[in-house]
Image (cartoon, coloured by chain):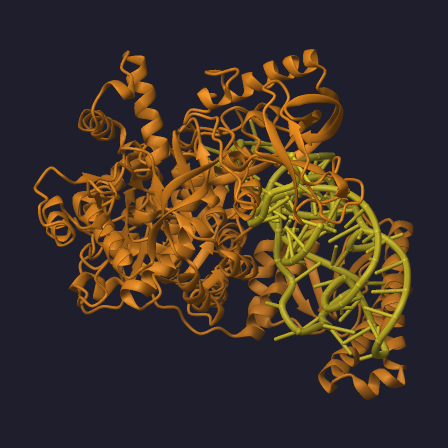
Amino acid sequence: MELPAIYDPSVTENKWYSYWLKHRFFHSTPDKRPKYSVVIPPPNVTGVLHMGHMLNNTIQDVLVRRARMQGKNTCWVPGTDHASIATEAKVVALLRDKGIQKTDITRDEFLKHAWAWKEKHGNIILEQLKRLGASCDWERTNFTMNPDMSRAVLDTFIYLYNKGLIYRGVRMVNWDPQGGTAVSDEEVIHREVSEKLYYLKYYFSHNGQRSTQYLSVATTRPETIMADVALCVNPGDERYAHLVGEKVLIPLINKEIPIIADDYVTMDFGTGCLKITPAHDPNDYEIGLRHKLPVIDILNLDGTLNGEARILVGEDRFVARKKILIMLEEAGCLEKEESYVTQIGFSERTDAVIEPRLSQQWFVKLSILAKKALEYVEDGQVRLIPDKYRNTYRHWMETARDWCISRQLWWGQQIPAYYLPGGEVVVASSEEEALVLARKIDSTLKAGDLKQDPDVVDTWFSSWLWPISVFDPEKPGHPEKEPNQELAYYYPTDDLVTAPDILFFWVARMIMAGDLFCGQKPFSNVYLTGMVRDKMGRKMSKSLGNSPDPIELMNIYGADGVRMGLMLCTSAGNDILFDETQMEQGRNFCNKIWNAFRLVSSWQRDEHLEQEETSRQAVRWFGQLLSATRDEAEDLFSKYRLSEVLMLLYKRFWDDFCSWYLEIIKPAGNAGKRIDAATYDSTLAFFDLLLHLLHPFMPFITEELWQNMAKRKEGDSIMVSPLPASGPCNQAELEDFSRLQELIVSIRGLRQNRQIPGKTLLKLYVKGQFPQILHGIARRMGGLESVQMVTEAPQEGNVYAFLVGTTVFFIPLWNLLDKEEERSKLNAELEYHRKFLAIVDKKLSNESFLQRAPADVVAIERKKRSDAMSRIAALKQQLDLL
RNA sequence: GGGAGCUUAGCUCAGCUGGUUUAGAGCACCUGCCUUACAAGCAGGGGGUCAUGAGUUCGAAUCUCUUAGCUCCCACCA
C-alpha cells in the first residue's frame, strides 16, 4: 500500500474513536483485576471546551490510558455540573430575549425551560472531549442534577441537619445583585480597584438643628449614608474623646445619629472617624451588634435603593453614588476627595460587585470537617502534586469559616426545609415526611400548610459528593449503609486532576464528604495543573480574544499534535504559556512517526538474507536503550513528570530510533528494499514498543500505525494489547555506543568543515579503546573505507587527529589540511584541558578536601585528573605531528 | 497587611538528598544540503559571570540570610 508522505489526522481520528467506542474499550465494570479509577472534574453544563479543559483532560487521558495498558480495570467517569448561577443566568437571558421575565413565570415553568436548554446544549462539551480522544466510560456519563444525584444531595442535607452540622442563621453574606443570590466566600474574587475616598461633613446637631461645626468622615461609599446609624471613633483618640455621646446629622437627609467609641476604629486612617452602616458592611454590622444599634437596609436585592433611603429611591447603587456626590457638593457637605486603591469583591460567576448583605441563609459548620480533611493531606493519605500546595491547603483549612450553602435560585436542588405557619422549620426528604414531623409540633397541621424553603443549595454542595455518588448515589447521607459493589470496588479513586483554583471549593470538600460518608479519602493523588495563559503570560479570556478555539486547533494540528504540544510544556502546578509553535512541534512529530513507518513498511522481509553485523549490533544497542528508556519513563511517571516522559520518548523516537537505528539498518541502495528477517522482526518489535509507550500521549496515530504494522483482527487494539517484553540492559555497552556516536559526529563535522563530500570514503586509524564489533557501524555511518587499530600515528602525509573520550582517532586528509588552523584549534583545546586540569589539581591538593570529601568523590576527581592528563598528552602528540 | 512560590541560553523549562569533565534539554537562531521515509526534513554549529549581595562549606545553580523584580493564595482599614 502506498502511503502519503504527510500524515493526515482527519482520516484516522474519527475512525479509531468510533472503533474504540464500538468495542467498548472505555467501559468498565468491577471484576477481579486491580482497578484504576478517576472521576472527571465535571465541566459546567453550559460550557464549551477551552484550553484549560484541553490540558486537564489530556492529562487525565494520559494517566487513564497508561493504567489501562498496564492491565488495570480502568474507569474514567465523565459528566457535567449543573452550575446553578451560570446556567440560571444563561436561561434568564435566553428567556429575556424571548420577552419573558423570570418573575412572570412560575418556578416549574422556569425549570422546564432550563431542562430544555440543558437537553439541547448540555452535551456539547462532552462531545468535544471525544474529539480530543478522551477515553471516558461514556456509559457512565452523569449529571449533578440527575434524580439520584439530587437524592444524594437532599439526603446529605438532612443528615447534616440532624447532626447539627447545618444550621440556618442571619449573617452577613456576599450578595450578588446581578445573580440575585448569595454566594460563598470562595466565590468572591477580590481585585484591586482605583476608587475615590470621599470626605463628608457630618454637622453637629443641637436639638436637631444643624450647627456650624462638623466632623469629617472618609468613605468610599457615599450612597450608603442614608443607612448610617452612628459615627464611631477610637476610645483612645484624644481629638474626639470629648465628642462621644454628641449627635450629628446625616448629610442631605438630616437624620440625627450618635457618636460612639469602639476599638475597631484605627486613628490614623482617614480622619479617624468612621460612619457605621450595619446593613452594608460586615465590620459595621459587628460594631452595631456590640452597641445595640439599629440596622437600616436601603438596598433592594437587585442593588437599587429602596424606600428606606428616602432619596434616590429606585436608582442603582452606582448611579446613586454619582448623583449623591453632586447633591453633597451642592449641599456643601463634600469636603474633599482623594484617589484611593482598594480591594473590591466581585462575583466569580457574574462579575458583579458583591454587596455585603444581611440575610437569613443556611450554613454548614466547617470547623470539625475541615480538621479531618486537613489530616488526610497532612499524613500523606492524600498526596498533592506538587506538594507546595500543602501549605496553602493547611492555611485555608485552619481558617475556614462556615460555608453558606443557600442560593436564591431555582436551578438546583431545592432545600428540603419546610416552614410551619408559625415559622418553625422541619427538614425532611418530602413534603409528606415533613408533615409527619411538623405534626409533632402542631398536630392540627394538614397538607398544604407547609411551605418549602424556596432556595436551592450551592452547586458545590452536590459536586463534593461526586466521587461517591457517581458510584453509589445512595451512600451520601448514609454513612452506616454498606457500600454497593461499585463503590466498594472503585472507591477511593486513584488520581484527581484539577486546577488549583478549586482546591478549596471542591477538592477539600470532597475530602470532607469522603470522610463523612465513607470514612475514607476520595482519591489518593491530586494532580494540580497550571493555568493556560497566552504567550505574554496573560490569562485567557473572551474579552482579550486571546483564547484559541481548541476544535480549530485540532483541525489544524490534529488531536495528537495538540495533545503533544500541551503535554510537552506542562509540569504540575506551573502555568503553561500557550504557544502555537508547540502544537506545530506535535504535528511534526506525528509526521515523523508516520514517515518512519512508511520507511519500515516499504521493506521486504527476506528469510534468506543473512543479518549483517552492523544490523546485529544496532539491534543489540537499541534493544538495550529501549529497556533503559522504559525504566526511566516508569520512574518519571511515578513522579507525575509527564512532560519529561514525553520529551524522553520524543528524543528516543526521533534521535535514536530514526536518526541512528533506522539509518544503520536501512538496506543500502544496491540491496533494494529487501531486509533480513531477523533485523526486520526486531525493528517491528521496537516500533511496536515505541507505539505502546507513546499511545497514552498520542492515541490516534499510534493506533493507526499499530493496526497497520501487522495483520490485526476486528476487536484488536493497541489500547488493550499486551506490552512487548524488553530485554536486559548493559550500561557499559550503551556507553560504548554513545562514544561511537560521538566519533561519527566528529567525522561529519570534519566533512562539513573541509567540504569533503559524503561519497568520498575516508580511512580511520584508532589508537586506544574502540570495540571491534562497532567498527562496521562506524564504517557505514562515517563513510569510511577502513578502520585500523594502531599504536602510533600513521605516517601518511597530513593526518587529522581528534579525541573521543581518551581514544585518539586519525584520518589522513591528503592536502586538505590547513596546518595553521589545525594548530590553533589544537592549542585552544589544549588550553581548555589545561585549565580543567588546574581546577581538578587545585581540589586534589586541598588537604581539607582530601580529608573531608567522601572517598568516591575523591576517586572521581582522580579519574578526572588522569583523563585530563592523557588527553593533554594526546593533544601534545598531535601538535608534534603537525 | 499576612503567607507561599518563582527568577538558569532569545523563548519554555529540567537540574531531586550540595561533588559525575569549569551548566542540560526542547523550540527558536546560524551554516551547508531537495542525500529515494520525512524540507512538517537531513547534517553541522553558536549561545548562559545560574536575578542580586553576603554567609555556611574542602566544595554552592543547589543550603541560610539580604536586596530587587514577578506570580499566586489568604485577609472586606472606612
Position of residue A233 in the picture relative to residue B35 (left or right): right
Q: Is residue A188 visible?
A: yes
Front-lying residue, A655 or A263: A263
Residue A107: horizontal and vertical position, in percent? Answer: 21, 28
- For this orientation, the residue located farthest to the front is A207
On-image quarter of the C terminus of chain A: bottom right
Residue shown at 21%/66% (left/top)? Answer: A488
Is residue A26 something that shows in the picture?
A: no
Q: Quadrant of the N terminus of chain A?
A: top left
The percent coordinates of residue A40 (x first, y second) are: 33, 49
* x and y, in percent, of residue A405 in the image: 36, 45
Which one is in front, A309 or A99? A309
Q: Colour of chain A?
A: orange
In this rendering, the answer to whether A246 lies above or below A619 is above
Q: In the figure, is residue A205 to the left or right of A865?
A: left
Q: Write down the quadrant of residue A558 in the picture.
A: top left
Q: Is residue A605 left or right of residue A775?
A: left
Q: Quadrant of residue A787 in the image?
A: bottom right
Q: Is residue A78 above or below residue A722?
A: above
Palette colour of chain B? yellow
Question: Which residue occupies the foreground of this view, A739 or A164?
Answer: A164
Residue found 50% across the figure and 35% down from its top: A279
Residue A738 x/y as whole percent: 61, 64
Looking at the rendered structure, the number of numbered marks drawn on it comes to 0
